Amino acid sequence: MSEDGKDINIKVEDSATTESQETPPKKEVSSFRLVATLAIAGALAGLLIVSVNQHTKPIIDKYKAEQLQIAVYEVLPGAEHYNTFYLVNDELSLTLPENAKESEYKRIYVGYDASGKVNGVAISRGEPGFQDIVQVIFGFDPSSGKLSGMKILDSKETPGLGDKIFKDMAFVEQFFAGPETPLLGVKIGAGKGQPNEIDMITGATISSKVVIRIINHALEEWTPVIDKGIPPAPTSSTETSVDTLADQEAPQ
Amino acid sequence: MNDQSLFSILFSAMVVNNFTLAMFLGLCPFMGVSARVETALRMGLGNIFVLVLTAISAWFLNTYILETAPYLRIISFIIVIASLVQIVEMAIKKLSPTLFRQLGIFLPLMTTNCAILGLAIFQTNRGYDFLQGLTFAIGAGLGLTLALVLMASIRETVEFSDVPNIARGTGLVLIIAGTLSMAFMGFAGLL
Amino acid sequence: MRTTTPSQDFIRGIWNENPVLIQMLGLCPALAVTNSVANALAMSAATFFVICCSSILISAFKQFIPSEVRISAYILVIATFVTLADMLLQAYAPAQHKELGAFIALIVVNCMILGRQEAFSAKNNVFRSLLDAMGTGIGFTIALVMMGGFREMLGTGSFLGVSLFGPNFEPWVIMVLPAGGFLTLGFILLAMGYFEQRKKAKEALTAEASS
């Protein structure tokens, strides 16, 4: 091990070849040497990470944007195009204030049909379920208050039981059949046939209730804001691209 | 942005999603320390202390530095944790040499305790703010201590039982842990 | 200088000194992500990548790392490769990345990797260190896939997503839950202890017989 502090400033490959073969007596290693080693190691590490990040970030962002897009179109059947609206000062806004951090703003996705009319609003929300947080995105029509679809974005519910909230198609399809809101969860067979009833999954009533609760809470939060009016925005897909979407973060 | 209430975070981390029995964090001390209730208690309390400090540091890092360089998260967290453990070790050595001797090797081992780094990462992923992060750390620490103490008291009793030779040691600890984990599953759905 | 041969360095990590089953290191990931074989493989691959790259780098630069800061330096190197693994996994296998979640980052505190650097890479050349790392990585993979296979087969009736027992199999859901992880590893260790005991008894008998 070379005791010459100057070695650190030479490229490491050169030092390896010019090192002598004798082992000098063990001396106290200077603090400078200790700090310098770690600093150089840190710098090299940083360099490596940044270069790989440059390469992978666009791929990751594009994937996230695509997943979001797929989810929104799934819960808003009939939508040809959608825009993201942020909650700014209790109102919907297409744009964020100057220097705002995008991840701190709640947002919803407004879908437009082929003729440019608003055909639905998709909202994503997460709340604790039986195990950890369940993230749900659902679509609804503000004019009629009926749901148009639901998709579980993230769930760690019990495999075989709670995970039926996205595996049990009979349960999921109820949300696509236009139930009225606010939703009411009922055990299978105990319902009165009301238009806002959702049959809960047998053996997974807690997870089912969580999904229903999330949707109802989201509607409580957003209906007053939506009723204030949806600002005009680009209504056809030729005016936005996936690259713009890639700048947006995944739903909170 | 996280709307979870403080109570639900505390209770969830402590019992429902117990760090050791449900999230598999903090297993090295769990296997190694848990033969005596007293040691287990001390280890647990030491962990709570380090966890709280970690939660605070993680929050600072996340809010002020890592916004611009999120990919440096893992490195900065582990460096901070290693330094924290070093500082705590030195502090305990000065303030209470007896405690230091009793904890022995376990203090520096806290650097590689997955629970500490795990806490920082979960806190980041769930977007907890300062107070939520703090509650999370306390809940997690209490849960860890609870698991450690339970395991230790069971092991103390089992030591006097007739356990077949092949089961002695880690095999038995794991099976006890499995049973404990099943018991804790009963708490799920309380929230 | 070590007195072991290169092939010994490689093979010993695979079974005799298996990091999970014999040395009891790396338990957190072993229990947490083995609820399916796919997850076990993904975690093993990521860990394999980290341990090999770290061993190569640390062995190559061992002369430049002063002893006082060696642990910090090792952790820095390991953390770098874990970050890289995390980014690459997120870009090229996003579904797996979501399943493994925080546990990819926790590879940093996997005592197995740090242990190999301290015990081997810091004292041996790059080639030997790589063999040692690969052997350990393969041993880790074997342990994880064993647990993952056991838990997935009993817990969901499938292997790598392919249903084995048909639709009438009532899965033992507990197996894919945390409790199942503990129990599976516990029983595997019990089984190993049993075979070890029998082997010792046989050896004792043959020793008696020949004496």
Image (cartoon, coloured by chain):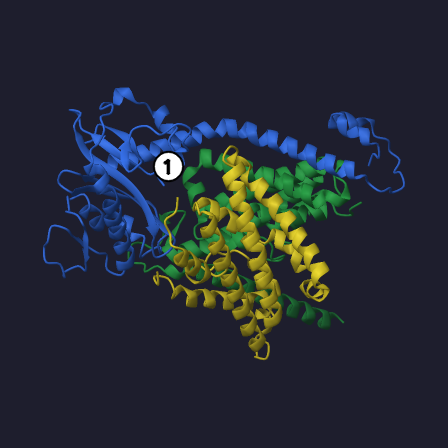
Chain colours: A blue, B yellow, C green
Residue visible at 39% across and 32% down?
A: A63
Q: Quadrant of residue A78?
A: top left
The C terminus of chain A, quarter of image: top left
Residue at the far front: name it.
A89
Residue at the far left: name it.
A193
Whether residue B103 is visible here, answered yes or no, is yes
Residue visible at 77% across and 44% down?
A: C67
Residue visible at 59% across and 30% down?
A: A48
Residue B142: percent from left, percent from top: 51, 62
The N terminus of chain A, quarter of image: top right
Is A110 situated left or right of B24 in this image? left
Amino acid type at circle 1 is Ala
Residue at image mark 1: A250
Establish if A21 lies above or below B137.
Answer: above
Is B191 situated left or right of C100 in this image? left
Q: Nearer the viewer, residue A137 or A203?
A: A137
Which chain is disc 1 placed on?
A: A
Residue B127: percent from left, percent from top: 43, 45
